[in-house]
């Protein structure tokens, strides 16, 4: 269809990509009175809702329940015949949760009067997007030209593999493949011990699979504080997960035959041995969706597939913003949402606080869970920041014993002179919930003494943060 024949519409703001970043930006812009079009080739919700955060956490919740039932005897509860996981039923529940949240997003689109346009979009300059529209039956249905005062690029990311290793969706799989299927392999090797790899490894192990984690770097959860990484490695090993850190193998030499997937792997400097597994899950990172979206028709700077933005998410084109996974960084849903809101505030002339990446919580939903915010100890040392550390184990927290989840600890790092909280690092049960308090504390520039002075109800797991903060000053009561 020619440019002239395409239907042309004009909005204050057009957002390309309706993942967490895109839809959060759209709803906030509508609240601020802007007319908004939100474009996606797929269903609203993006990676997080359909292929990421939500389906994985639904599966992990089932795995967690299975684990607890398996330990029911320790709580004085007998479960006749034990418990087994049913991968098909787990997948069904996962789908129901995703569908329910998807419906919720559609109703929010209506509530905010956002124009949701299904189709593949391409920038033609900073403020025009040509959309090849798609109908409800997923068929091409025409073309629309959307013009706007401002545009936000929020096209997210996709799975990526290693050079020479081509996922076939059956034996060599990505997170997308796992989340499309319901089957359970007897043995799995997971490449990558970041959040995604660790979560799947944890899930598969709970469901009874033999699991091996292969991590190129010398530690699991390599971006976390070293104390947390070490504790996590021990905890996963106790669960029977085999871990190879500093793992070296040639991805292009991975071989698949009737007996399984063959990987010649060994720790750096050692003779490799053959690992044969039913399934190889590649969780080696994500690639930003920045090709084929028309960025070359703009002045936006793209470096190694990542769009460069300033503190307000503005690209080198004043009316083109970029948010979420396309700008790299933490690659997290709540970060994408905050970036979206930051961009919209700047566009609408509302008060706009730059996104503070040091105050972005990070969470891994393996068992045990890991959650953190701010600087690690190594980062403080590297940057020459004087610091003090408080650390308290869950063993010292009554509720952790009551809950039967007393692995792990909380570590608070505070500035040695000002006492301001620099970082909080936690490992253990429910720490992905507990980290929110650290996030609020850091937002208000709280000191360790402030956090310790806040009253935590007894007995709760939340007490651990207060205790660890007071431990910075040698004043924890229960440890
Ligand atoms: C397995 C897994 C688990 C995860 N778990 C968590 C978690 O627990 N917590 C967390 O914070 N983060 C998690 N993440 C990361 C999180 O999903 C992403 O950081 C987040 O989705 C990024 O949001 P986004 O809006 O930038 O992009 P996306 O969510 O990727 O959305 C981009 C959208 O753009 C659309 N699009 C792309 N190109 C075009 C085009 N040309 N035209 C039209 N539409 C287009 C896509 O269809 C997609 O809907 C997880 C990721 C994975 C893979």
Image (cartoon, rainbow, N blue to C red):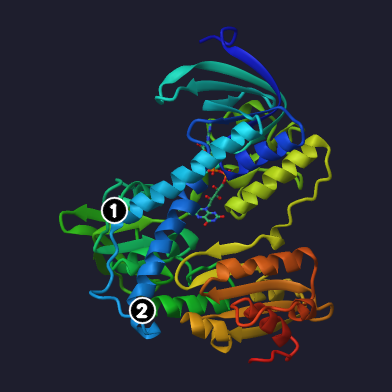
Based on the displayed image, in which of its 4 quarters is residue 375 positioned?
bottom right
Residues at discs 2 and 1 in contact (Cβ within 8 Å): no
Residue hosting label 2: 72
161 and 4: which is toward the camera: 4
Based on the displayed image, in which of its 4 quarters is residue 381 positioned?
bottom right
Q: Is residue 159 something one can see in this rendering?
A: no
Residue at image location 69% in from the left, 72% down from the top: 423
Q: Is residue 85 above or below residue 415?
A: above
Instruction: Indicate which label's residue lies in the foreground, 2 or 1.
Output: 2
Distance from Cα at disc 2 to Cα at disc 1: 24 Å
Based on the displayed image, in which of its 4 quarters is residue 395 positioned?
bottom right
Q: Is mark 2 within 8 Å of ligand 1?
A: no
Residue at image location 44% in from the left, 52% down from the top: 55
Percent x, y of residue 477: 69, 91
Q: Classify mark 1: helix, strand or loop.
A: helix
Q: Classify mark 2: helix, strand or loop.
A: helix
Residue hosting label 1: 88
């Amino acid at each position: 269809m020619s440019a002239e024949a395409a239907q042309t519409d004009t909005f204050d703001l057009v957002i390309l990509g309706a993942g967490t970043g895109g839809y959060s930006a759209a709803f906030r812009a509508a609240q601020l009175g802007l007319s908004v079009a939100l474009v996606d080739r797929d269903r609203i919700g993006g990676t997080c809702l359909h292929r990421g955060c939500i389906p994985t956490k639904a599966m992990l919740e089932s795995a967690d329940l299975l684990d607890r039932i398996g330990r029911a005897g320790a709580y004085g509860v007998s479960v006749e015949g034990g418990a087994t996981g049913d991968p098909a039923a787990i997948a069904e529940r996962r789908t129901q949760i995703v569908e329910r949240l998807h419906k919720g997003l559609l109703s929010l689109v209506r509530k905010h009067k956002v124009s949701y346009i299904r189709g593949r979009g391409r920038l033609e300059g900073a403020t025009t997007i040509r959309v090849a529209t798609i109908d409800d039956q997923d068929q091409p249905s025409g073309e629309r030209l959307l013009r706007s005062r401002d545009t936000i690029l929020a096209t997210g990311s996709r799975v990526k593999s290693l050079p020479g290793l081509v996922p076939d969706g059956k034996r060599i799989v990505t997170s997308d493949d796992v989340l499309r299927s319901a089957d359970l392999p007897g043995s799995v090797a997971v490449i990558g011990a970041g959040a995604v790899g660790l979560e799947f490894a944890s899930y598969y192990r709970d469901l009874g699979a033999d699991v091996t984690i292969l991590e190129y770097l010398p530690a699991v959860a390599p971006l976390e504080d070293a104390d947390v990484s070490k504790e996590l490695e021990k905890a996963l090993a106790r669960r029977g997960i085999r871990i190879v850190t500093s793992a070296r193998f040639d991805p292009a030499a991975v071989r698949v035959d009737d007996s399984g997937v063959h990987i010649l792997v060994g720790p750096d400097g050692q003779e490799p041995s053959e690992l044969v597994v039913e399934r190889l899950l590649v969780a080696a990172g994500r690639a930003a969706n920045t090709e084929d979206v028309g960025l070359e028709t703009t002045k936006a700077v793209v470096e190694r597939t990542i769009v460069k933005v300033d503190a307000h998410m503005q690209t080198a084109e004043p009316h083109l913003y970029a948010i979420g996974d396309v700008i790299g960084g933490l690659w997290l849903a709540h970060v994408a949402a905050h970036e979206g809101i930051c961009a919209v505030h700047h566009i609408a002339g509302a008060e706009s606080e730059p996104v503070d990446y040091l105050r972005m919580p990070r969470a891994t939903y393996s068992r045990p869970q890991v959650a953190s915010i701010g600087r690690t100890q190594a980062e403080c040392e590297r940057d020459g920041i004087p610091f003090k550390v408080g650390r308290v184990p869950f063993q010292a927290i009554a509720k952790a014993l009551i809950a039967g989840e007393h692995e792990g600890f909380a570590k608070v790092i505070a500035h040695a002179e000002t006492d301001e909280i620099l970082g909080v690092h936690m490992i253990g049960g429910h720490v992905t919930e507990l980290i929110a308090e650290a996030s609020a504390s850091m937002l208000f520039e709280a000191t360790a003494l402030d956090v310790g002075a806040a009253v935590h109800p007894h007995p709760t797991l939340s007490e651990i943060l207060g205790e660890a903060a007071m431990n910075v000053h040698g004043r924890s009561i229960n440890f």
